[in-house]
Image: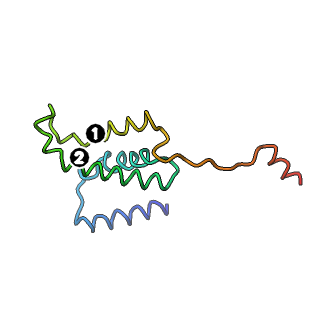
Amino acid sequence: MIAAAIAAIGGALYAFYVGGTIAIAYDRTSWTFWPFMMILIGGLANNKGVLVGTLLFVTLRKFIIFFKDSLQPYVPFDVVWLDFLLLGVILIAVLLYRPQGIFTEKPTKTISKEGFTDKQKS
Protein backbone atom coordinates (compact mmCIF):
# COMPACT_ATOMS: atom_id res chain seq x y z
CA MET A 1 0.00 0.00 0.00
CA ILE A 2 2.83 2.38 0.80
CA ALA A 3 4.53 1.64 -2.53
CA ALA A 4 1.27 2.35 -4.38
CA ALA A 5 0.91 5.67 -2.55
CA ILE A 6 4.49 6.63 -3.42
CA ALA A 7 3.88 5.66 -7.05
CA ALA A 8 0.70 7.76 -7.12
CA ILE A 9 2.53 10.78 -5.72
CA GLY A 10 5.32 10.27 -8.26
CA GLY A 11 2.78 10.07 -11.09
CA ALA A 12 1.04 13.23 -9.94
CA LEU A 13 4.35 15.09 -9.70
CA TYR A 14 5.34 13.86 -13.16
CA ALA A 15 2.01 15.10 -14.57
CA PHE A 16 2.70 18.54 -13.09
CA TYR A 17 6.24 18.44 -14.50
CA VAL A 18 5.21 17.67 -18.09
CA GLY A 19 2.14 19.89 -17.93
CA GLY A 20 -0.52 17.23 -18.47
CA THR A 21 -1.07 13.63 -19.36
CA ILE A 22 -2.40 11.66 -22.29
CA ALA A 23 -2.86 7.92 -22.31
CA ILE A 24 -0.86 7.34 -25.51
CA ALA A 25 2.32 8.72 -23.88
CA TYR A 26 2.57 5.79 -21.49
CA ASP A 27 3.25 2.80 -23.68
CA ARG A 28 4.72 -0.47 -22.51
CA THR A 29 8.00 -0.07 -24.35
CA SER A 30 9.17 3.18 -22.81
CA TRP A 31 7.93 2.51 -19.28
CA THR A 32 8.71 -1.19 -18.85
CA PHE A 33 10.96 -2.57 -21.57
CA TRP A 34 13.52 0.25 -21.78
CA PRO A 35 14.29 0.24 -18.02
CA PHE A 36 14.46 -3.56 -18.03
CA MET A 37 16.88 -3.38 -20.97
CA MET A 38 19.06 -0.85 -19.12
CA ILE A 39 19.35 -3.26 -16.21
CA LEU A 40 20.09 -6.25 -18.45
CA ILE A 41 22.83 -4.43 -20.35
CA GLY A 42 24.58 -3.21 -17.20
CA GLY A 43 24.22 -6.33 -15.12
CA LEU A 44 21.66 -7.67 -12.71
CA ALA A 45 22.12 -7.21 -8.96
CA ASN A 46 24.89 -4.67 -9.38
CA ASN A 47 24.29 -0.95 -8.85
CA LYS A 48 27.38 0.06 -10.80
CA GLY A 49 26.25 -2.13 -13.70
CA VAL A 50 22.78 -0.60 -13.70
CA LEU A 51 24.28 2.90 -13.76
CA VAL A 52 26.65 2.05 -16.62
CA GLY A 53 23.87 0.23 -18.50
CA THR A 54 21.60 3.25 -18.16
CA LEU A 55 24.29 5.67 -19.33
CA LEU A 56 25.18 3.42 -22.25
CA PHE A 57 21.54 2.93 -23.23
CA VAL A 58 20.65 6.63 -23.09
CA THR A 59 23.81 7.62 -24.98
CA LEU A 60 23.21 5.04 -27.72
CA ARG A 61 19.54 5.96 -28.03
CA LYS A 62 20.27 9.70 -28.32
CA PHE A 63 23.06 8.95 -30.81
CA ILE A 64 20.72 6.81 -32.94
CA ILE A 65 17.91 9.39 -32.80
CA PHE A 66 20.33 12.17 -33.78
CA PHE A 67 21.70 10.35 -36.84
CA LYS A 68 18.74 8.29 -38.02
CA ASP A 69 17.40 10.91 -40.45
CA SER A 70 20.73 11.01 -42.27
CA LEU A 71 20.56 7.22 -42.68
CA GLN A 72 17.22 7.31 -44.55
CA PRO A 73 18.75 6.91 -48.05
CA TYR A 74 20.75 3.85 -46.96
CA VAL A 75 18.11 1.71 -45.24
CA PRO A 76 15.19 0.03 -47.05
CA PHE A 77 12.62 0.87 -44.34
CA ASP A 78 11.31 3.88 -42.46
CA VAL A 79 13.90 5.18 -40.00
CA VAL A 80 11.26 5.83 -37.35
CA TRP A 81 11.84 2.29 -36.09
CA LEU A 82 15.63 2.38 -36.32
CA ASP A 83 16.24 3.01 -32.61
CA PHE A 84 13.99 0.09 -31.65
CA LEU A 85 15.71 -2.16 -34.18
CA LEU A 86 19.31 -1.29 -33.25
CA LEU A 87 18.71 -1.38 -29.51
CA GLY A 88 16.99 -4.75 -29.90
CA VAL A 89 20.02 -6.06 -31.79
CA ILE A 90 22.30 -4.72 -29.04
CA LEU A 91 20.18 -6.45 -26.40
CA ILE A 92 20.33 -9.76 -28.29
CA ALA A 93 24.12 -9.41 -28.66
CA VAL A 94 24.55 -8.70 -24.94
CA LEU A 95 22.35 -11.67 -24.00
CA LEU A 96 24.25 -13.98 -26.35
CA TYR A 97 27.82 -12.95 -25.58
CA ARG A 98 27.57 -11.56 -22.06
CA PRO A 99 24.39 -12.89 -20.39
CA GLN A 100 25.45 -11.63 -16.95
CA GLY A 101 25.68 -8.04 -18.27
CA ILE A 102 28.67 -5.73 -18.48
CA PHE A 103 29.39 -6.04 -14.75
CA THR A 104 28.93 -9.42 -13.15
CA GLU A 105 27.39 -10.00 -9.76
CA LYS A 106 30.01 -10.39 -7.05
CA PRO A 107 29.91 -13.77 -5.30
CA THR A 108 28.65 -13.66 -1.75
CA LYS A 109 30.28 -15.50 1.10
CA THR A 110 27.92 -17.99 2.65
CA ILE A 111 28.26 -20.52 5.41
CA SER A 112 28.08 -24.16 4.41
CA LYS A 113 25.37 -26.37 5.87
CA GLU A 114 27.89 -28.07 8.13
CA GLY A 115 29.24 -24.76 9.39
CA PHE A 116 25.72 -23.52 10.04
CA THR A 117 24.76 -26.57 12.09
CA ASP A 118 28.05 -26.38 14.04
CA LYS A 119 27.29 -22.76 14.98
CA GLN A 120 23.80 -23.69 16.14
CA LYS A 121 25.10 -26.48 18.40
CA SER A 122 27.59 -24.24 20.17
**Tag 2 secondary structure:** helix
Q: Residue at x 16, y 40 (%)?
A: 79
x, y percentage for residue 16? 27, 68
From the viewer's perspective, is residue 93 above or below residue 29?
Answer: above
Q: Residue at x 22, y 66 (%)?
A: 19
x, y percentage for residue 113? 78, 43
Report crowding for label 1: few under 14, some 14 to 19, many 20 or more residues within 10 A (C-alpha): some
Which residue of the protein is positioned furthest toward the top in this rendering? 76
Q: Which mark is residue 13?
A: none
Assess whether mark 2 and mark 1 are in contact (beta carbons under 8 angstroms): yes
Return the residue at label 2. 64
The amino acid pointed to by label 1 is Leu
Separation of residues labelled 1 and 2 (CA atoms): 8 Å
Left or right placement of residue 13 versus residue 96 in this view: left
**Tag 1 secondary structure:** helix
Residue sitting nearer the eye, 83 or 15: 83
Q: Residue at x 37, y 64 (%)?
A: 10
Return the residue at label 1. 86
Q: Mark 1 or mark 2, which has the lower sequence index? A: 2
Residue sitting nearer the eye, 30 or 115: 115
Left or right placement of residue 28 versus residue 110 in this view: left
Residue sitting nearer the eye, 75 or 26: 75
The amino acid pointed to by label 2 is Ile
